[in-house]
Image (spheres, rainbow, N blue to C red):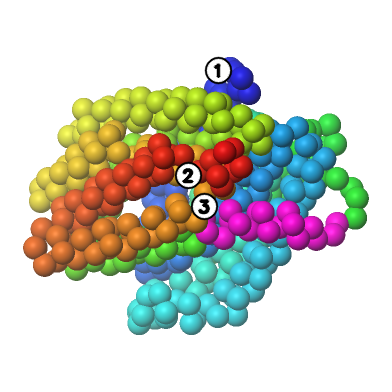
Amino acid sequence: MLFSNKALKKLIIPLIMEQTLAITVGMADTMMISSVGEAAVSGVSLVDMFNNLIISVLAALATGGAVVTSQLIGASRQEEACRSAKQLFWVDGLITVLISLLVIAGHRFILNLFFGKIEEDVMRNAVLYLMISALSFPFLAVYNACAALFRSMGNSQVTLKVSILMNILNVGGNALCVFGLKMGVAGVAVPSLVSRAVAGFCLYILLKNPDRLIHLGRERFHFDWKVIRRILYIGIPSGIENGIFQLGRVIVVSIIAGFGTAQIAANGVANSLDSMGCIVGQGMNLAMITVIGQCVGAGDLAQVRYYTRKLLLITYAATAVTNSLILLFLHPILGLYGLGAEATELAYILVMIHNGMAMLLWPASFVLPNMLRACNDVKYTMTMAIFSMVTFRIGLSLVFGVHMEMGAVGVWAAMVVDWVFRVCCFGWRYFRGYWKKSCNLI
């Protein structure tokens, strides 16, 4: 077998810890910027919606490179894997520099396009935060590309250590710049820029080591369009899918915003608890790319099936345990947020809907598609995911939430319908075996 139980633990546990760290640091950032004032909080929260769109696209490009490199590792074509790594590094970097320049040049247009007319104080904070964030995109691209390559090798411990360093710099810098230097919004943006630059540089230096299975060689770089096409074949559909998903989330939030303050507050609290319930699944998404990609590269259909079942079973078990604990202690957890009675009761219902159904549906809805992507079956996953988002997550949110006056509960019910559709589509695709043709295992 390509991966022993010990090797799987070494891959998966650091990935889960990395996801946990990202979520908790994000919560700490929000708490710190809230001390600056409502205009700052509003500006940062609006720009973060756009930033998440960019970050999801960058992550998709890195995923394309990770799939190609994992397949070449599985096929024992180390030299080609190293060349594909270098192609990913440069292509990802150049695309991101172009994105950053476009964002900096059109920052006002972007903010007006996404958020319409907003108060001047909020706009001023949003512009400053967006400009500094845009400068950090190329460094984040380097980090994402290098981290994806380390995961392709099955070495997630390195990315965890660098992630810890990055988040310490981020949180420490935020505390210094926000509370000590009183830099306002810049006090959150600048530490993010510095921490991403340091993390990207560290992983880049570590990948230069020729003793590693995959490394960035010293030979002169030239574009290998065959490899680039393979990377973009995975990366572009995944980027479109991720981008539409993030846009869909923005639209759904805007729908909930029309339901009143209590429902907005309940939705925000429920979202934070939902993220905790899906931490294991988020880590397993990354593991699935590495494991199945190497099995595809090795041309071993039996191992593709074996590890797909094994990783899904682990995800289901861990998701059930995590969400059961959240639901068991939900009342005291909600008490920590200091919400009013109406918002607390609604948050309880929303978390019960999400975390209860997640135990049954989330792994097959979001982890299984990464198995298909690792098999190059990306167009199908993109098409079904976008259709489901537009038709069910958005369309039914309007039907249930607005027209049937179910409010936030209706929006979250629409989310469950979206999950059910995804499970049916991706489960059918897996069991019918159409993915085998995409990765030449038929």
Local SS, label 2: loop
Q: Which residues are magenta?
A: 221-239
* Quadrant of the image occupied by residue 253: bottom left
Q: Please tell me which residue lies in front, 39 or 232.
A: 232
Q: Quadrant of the C terminus?
A: top right
The mark found on residue 434 in the picture is 2
Marking on residue 378? 3
Q: Nearer the viewer, mark 1 or mark 3?
A: 3
Q: Earlier in the sequence, mark 1 or mark 3?
A: 1
Where disc 3 sits, the SS reads helix
Q: Please, is residue 318 above or below residue 50 in the view? A: above
Question: According to the image, label 1 marks what residue?
Answer: 5
Q: Position of residue 73 (x, y in %)?
A: 71, 35
Give the dominant element type of the magenta stretch: helix, strand or loop: helix
Question: Which tag, 1 or 2, sits closer to the chain's start?
Answer: 1
Does the magenta segment cover residue 179? no
Q: Secondary structure at mark 1?
A: helix
